[in-house]
Each structure stands twice: as structure tokens, then as C-alpha cells.
Image (spheres, helix red, strand yellow):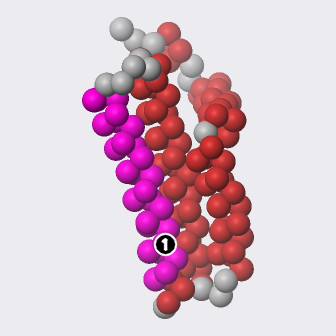
Amino acid sequence: MESPYKGKTGLVRLWNAFGYSLAGFRAAYKHEDAFRQEVLLAVVMIPLALWLPVGYIGQALMISSVLLVIIVELLNSAVEATVDRISLENHDLAKRAKDIGSSAVLVSLINVFVVWGLVLLH
């Protein structure tokens, strides 16, 4: 069975997708403490990366590593919301899904430290 919302095409689809994306950012910011903390991290670290004398490649790596944390956190939050929508009771698979999403966020944060460390040490 196909979703009835898949019928839009062209500029209408792009406009709607943009609106859904903004709604997703607002929902994550409103409901997810970790997302707010990581946005604050990005607000500090992205301008810092642009200010540091590390060259364009270094800046690109530093900024993309920070943005990757935001991406992974958004996906993790989506997984958590989906799991909670299905059931709020404790279940091994629900715990596994949430723990794996959390691990992905941790790996993306480690990536920030590795990338920033290597760029700054170079």
C-alpha cells in the first residue's frame, strides 16, 4: 500500500519537503535536550572553525564533522520517537534500537574530536 502523501511532484514537492524539514528541526529542538546541546556546540564550533587558520580543507573537515553530529542526532531522535510510538513498555528490541542509535551519536562525537585534533595538530 502506497502513502497517499506521495502524489506531489516538482516545486510543490520541494516546497512541502522544505516545510517538513523545518518542522523536524523545530520538533527536535523542542523535544530533544541532546539536540539542543549539539546545536549549541555547532553554534560555537562552526564559527571557530571558520576563524582558525587551518585552510579551506581543514575548515571543511571540521565543519562537516560537527554537522554530522547534528545529522546523526536527528536520525537517533527519529528512531527513539518511532520506538516510543510503537510501545512505551520495556522490550529488548526497543532497548537495542535506542542503544544502537545512541552509539551512533557517540561515534559521531568521537569523530569530531579526532578530526579537530588532527586538523589542529597538523
Of 88 and 85, the residue lying toward us: 88
- 73 lies above or below 113: above
Can you tell which quarter of the image residue 88 is in? top left
The residue sitting at the bottom extreme is: 122
Do we see residue 18 in this rendering?
no
Can you tell which quarter of the image residue 27 is in? top right
Q: Position of residue 96 (x, y in %)?
A: 31, 37
- 25 lies above or below 13: below
Q: Position of residue 15 (x, y in %)?
A: 67, 30
State the residue at coordinates (58%, 47%): 34
State the residue at coordinates (47%, 41%): 75
Q: Which residues are magenta?
A: 92-118
Of 1 and 90, the residue lying toward us: 90
Q: Tell whether position 116 is magenta.
A: yes
The residue sitting at the left extreme is: 92
Numbered disc 1: secondary structure: helix
Do we see residue 9 in this rendering?
yes
State the residue at coordinates (43%, 66%): 110
Q: Quadrant of the N terminus?
A: top left
State the residue at coordinates (61%, 39%): 32
Of 31 and 69, the residue lying toward us: 31
**On the picture, is 90 further left or further right than 67?**
left
Q: Tell whether position 93 is magenta.
A: yes
Q: Amino acid at mark 1?
A: Phe
Residue underneath mark 1: 113
Q: Residues within 10 Å of mark 1 (few under 14, many from 20)?
A: some
- 92 lies above or below 114: above
